[in-house]
Amino acid sequence: MELADVPAQPVKKRNRMKLDAKIPEGPIQEKWSRYRNKLKLVNPSNKRKFRVIVVGSGLAGASAAATMSELGYAVDCFCFQDSPRRAHSIAAQGGINAAKNYPGDGDSIYRLFYDTVKGGDFRSREANVHRLAEVSGLIIDQCVAQGVPFAREYGGLLDNRSFGGAQVSRTFYARGQTGQQLLIGAYSALSRQVASGNVRMFTRMEMLDVVVVDGRASGIVTRNLVTGEVESHAADAVVLATGGYANVFFLSTNAMGCNVTAAYRAYKKGAGFANPCFTQIHPTCIPVAGDHQSKLTLMSESLRNDGRVWVPQQVGDTRPPNEIPDAERDYFLERKYPSFGNLTPRDVASRSAKEVCDEGRGVGKTGLGVYLDFRDATARMGRDTVAAKYGNLFDMYQRITDENPYQVPMRIFPAPHYTMGGLWVDYNLMSTVEGLFVIGEANFSDHGANRLGASALMQGLADGYFILPATIGNYFAQLGISHQTVSPDHAEFKQAEQGCTTRLNRLLNASGNRTVDSFHKELGRIMWENCGMSRNAEGLEKALQQIPELREEFWKNVKVMGAGEELNLSLEKAGRVADFLEFGELMCRDALTRNESCGGHFREEYQTPEGEAVRDDEQYCHSAVWEYTGDDAVPIRNEEQLEFEYVELALRSYK
Amino acid sequence: MHFTLKIWRQENADVAGGIQTYEVDDISGDTSFLEMLDILNDQLESDGGLPVAFDHDCREGICGTCSLMINGTPHGPETTTTCQLHMRSFQDGDTIFIEPWRAAAFPVVRDLVVDRSAFDRIIRAGGFVSIDTGSAQDANNTPIPKDDADYAFDAATCIGCGACVAACKNASAMLFVSAKVSHLAHVPQGDAERRGRVLSMVDTMDAEGFGSCTNYTDCEAACPKAISTDHIAVLNREFIRAKIGRTT
Amino acid sequence: MVSQNQLFRTGPLASVLAKIGVAITGGGLILFVLAHMFGNLQVFLGPDTFNLYAYKMQHMVLLWPARIGLLAIFVAHMGLVFLLTRQNSVARPVGYASYEPIQSTVASRYMLQTGVVILLFVVYHLLHFTLHRVHYPDSTVGFAAQIEYQTPPYVGQQMHNAYDMVVYSFQQPVVALVYVLAQLFLAAHLWHGGQSLFQTIGMKNENRRALLTRVGPLLAMVVLIGNCSIPIAVLLNILQASSTA
Ligand SMILES: Cc1cc2nc3c(=O)[nH]c(=O)nc-3n(C[C@H](O)[C@H](O)[C@H](O)COP(=O)(O)OP(=O)(O)OC[C@H]3O[C@@H](n4cnc5c(N)ncnc54)[C@H](O)[C@@H]3O)c2cc1C
Ligand code: HEM
Ligand code: SF4
Ligand code: FES
């Protein structure tokens, strides 16, 4: 393999953090079951004495809050939306994986485990991934029992489809609204617990800080988004289920409110942040139409099952797509990856689309788009079948673009979508701060450097329904029943409250003349250009210069109208953007120090002459875990080495 | 395009509000309705004014956060959510009224933002199956006829936006409640609790201060997910069954 | 953990229950309206048939129980409507500056108003034909008198000449006008009510919906044409008095 010229990057290697993954002993198939048998338990009558705060009510948060409440713990659940049902998980379309092997096409726990490790480009922890595959089936059982209306076949049994490049059909789905149906299921379980009085639900509440007392997470500070009140909430453990940070790019497929605030504040309180540069760019999104655009819309990946992706062979071919004959089209995914074709994994498909656009062969007004064509599928299956399978997606496309995809090919372009990076957690899902657990997209997860389609829902629910409720019991048992919950009047709480209030006031008093959005857009542009689909040292270094400058300007020149003691959407946004402005820097730093290409992290310096990613297992077979050392100090990069015993470290090839 | 906007402004729940007039210019047809409001807010903030508060999150038509009564119709003139509405649905020079959902059960929080927590309380009253995590049997042990599953799905697509309430002359929440009752009435998992569920949810609906159902059907026409009022008939059926059916 | 009973709360009179009551009583009233109409249409079969019908109705064994029952249904209908209307009237304290109904019918939105007109009409109708207090043709004239029945098997039976009472009443244009107008309101009420009740008692579903929804307008037209045909026929001299004033 030939490497392009590679500038050497200094890598600070210093492990200050205690990164004990606590992976249990034993063969991988038995680790979880053996471990569960050994976990300490809390006596049922004592469970209600332990209070746990769950921040987030998405799939991970809602399922965890409901399950822990069923077990008998006292739960306080928080979300910033007006209802827990509106968490961003609701937007997931495609489906959820489970190794049920209902279709009998050879799937198994091992195969799901294998696919996930390989799909993640060998940057995840084997033991965690295997556990995920093990509980995947239980998730489906649980959801069906809640009444989730998954797609069924005429015989009344559950239907599966192949998704995101998997070679078996293991994806359960509910039309194009799988996330919605799963979240409504978790939300209904949560609602039942709220009705029982075991869960206190706090909506329109934003977490602004984690409070750590004597090394243990002891509560949080929130801002009531309606009244503006800054309050403390104490508990015996804190669970963050606050989702991903793709909105650092400003334009992404995430909901407008998605943010890094909770995770970032936890990072500042001592939780290690792992692999922040591992972000996923989804290939099938509707291209940007103009400056007014506030977010990007994902078109389900399932479209790639039947649609064919192409661009004109000639640069500057502006003929309408239907007038370009087949011979002059470049079905570039089929050409480059004959065995996976249009179903190559997301990172590969996205990058290929970017390449052809960089060559000037992109389509649409902006030249940033490729065609996703259903002409052949329509000829093969008939328009009605296409409509039955994809009708709602076609309608959505037409509503947004005003073009009819039955007649002209859709235009798609990659967009930031998911973040594999997140707070580092051990096998118990506990971060480097005692008693601070992180689940769902917010943790650095089981997806390594790239997530396979339909696996985020699986992971969020695995964490929430099955894993955290088991491991948190062990933590409480260790605390013991004589443990006293810290009072919310404790000095640490007061200090944290003070810190939050001061920061809010700073934002309100900045009285500059630039809107929050304009800063967010500028940050987004910096991130997209330099830390997006492909990265290089030069760009990252430039970004590392630009971001602090932008941040400085932000604090001087941001304009936040209104007051603190009221519903103030600009203030909310400003706080989130302020955190993104710090976090973006961390992301670039991580990208700059990972001198290899793997999964969603593509460093231009590390590629074969054909443009394939080159991983460096010698030096980078680890998770990079960043440790906060002060506002103006460079954070420390710690490493958790990854061992691959069951899946052979191999080149990830989809040719 | 140019628009004259007549927007309800109200500082908080305790003070009176009123309609204010604003102008926006240079809006392209591809701009979504909420992006048009973003532009207005940018304009307001630059002029030192307070931005208009409105609810939104996913901007994909699925979370149910966005609301807005647009020219007297919830979510505006198309069968979709406000966030998926585009300005090409309007004519250059149009005057557009933008008001919050109006219902005693949905008090205004600020400007166009209302409090829809009443919906959560209705779901808490019975919109669930009582099954503890981990106690479920294998998912394929209970086949469900595809038609039933599909029908349940049609009901389950409700995004809890509240447009049905906003559209209803009585501010009734029957469509929302019936969607959940009907969803769970069409899957066997919902069977064990169907009696208690419908009675309790209807009771909570009344207690929250929603109106009753006169079968106007404006709700289904306003519903961005095209939930049919047939589900209200299902609710009524479930209710009658629960009242006069066997108790044991 | 909380038991089922604690989780589910149920109150005594839910809006849905009240509404089902409205539908059932409304349905009862519809049956009455139809029976009443078909009875009255016998006026077209001539004085004998009609007078006998009136006579039989008057002398029905269960006349008073029937009247009381009907009144109870009517009062129950209104009572439940009162409860629902009260609930609705507080459900939207602040109205819209701009409000556009999307697909509801005018009839459905004015149920209360049409209902109130029906109530007023019923009062008038009773004062008129039953209690003979208003617009009642002078009682000294011949038609109001008892007549002797001519056709077997009731030959010689003394009967009230209801036929002429109807004809002479409707010959007064005001009376005919009041009746015709009232029927318009009744028709509007039935236009919506006559199909809405199927929804309320849970009979509608995807397949039956289209059919059942047509029942309301059909009923409305039948009742409108049926009931109005009498005053109009009188005004057009198609129905003429059997005795002279
Ligand atoms: C358009 C789209 C489609 C997708 N499709 C699929 C798919 O088909 N299959 C799949 O497996 N995955 C899919 N994903 C990914 C998947 O949906 C997410 O990764 C997953 O739902 C994340 O769940 P979560 O519970 O971790 O977080 P979220 O659902 O994002 O929930 C975060 C919660 O945290 C709360 N929160 C956040 N910050 C704060 C704060 N500071 N204070 C208080 N509360 C806070 C929020 O209120 C919210 O309740 C998709 C993602 C997108 C964007
Ligand atoms: C001959 C007399 C009447 C008949 C046949 C009749 C019939 C009906 C029917 C069938 C319904 C529909 C029930 C449903 O939607 O399920 C209805 C509803 C209604 N009726 Fe009547 N009705 C009569 C008299 C009245 C009177 C006197 C009033 C008022 C004072 C009234 C007020 C209403 C109202 C307001 C409704 C709508 C209730 C609601 O859904 O909120 N009706 N009626
Ligand atoms: S029924 Fe329709 S309009 Fe009503 S809350 Fe649900 S989605 Fe919104
Ligand atoms: S913002 Fe989510 S539905 Fe409109």
Image (cartoon, rainbow, N blue to C red):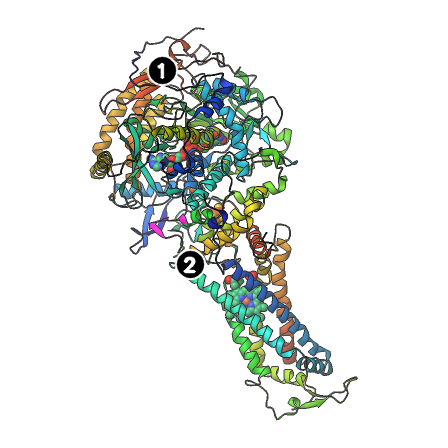
Quarter occupied by residue C158: bottom right
Please state the horizontal and vertical placement of residue B145, each as a whole percent of the image.
63, 40
Judged from the image, the quadrant occupied by ligand 1 is top left
**Structural crowding at the residue carrying mark 2, measured as other residues with C-alpha within 10 Å and reported as few (<14), some (14–19) or many (≥20):** many
The disc at residue A594 is: 1
Please state the horizontal and vertical placement of residue A477, each as a whole percent of the image.
38, 30
Relative placement, left or right, of B239 versus A7 is right
The amino acid beneath tag 2 is Ala
Residue B116 included in the magenta stretch of the image: yes
Please state the horizontal and vertical placement of residue A442, each as a whole percent of the image.
38, 29
Please state the horizontal and vertical placement of residue C150, each as a whole percent of the image.
76, 87
Q: Is residue A284 above or below residue B173?
A: above
Q: Chain of mark 1?
A: A
Residue, disc 2:
C91
Q: Which contiguous range is marked in magenta?
A: B104-117
**Structural crowding at the residue carrying mark 1, measured as other residues with C-alpha within 10 Å and reported as few (<14), some (14–19) or many (≥20):** many
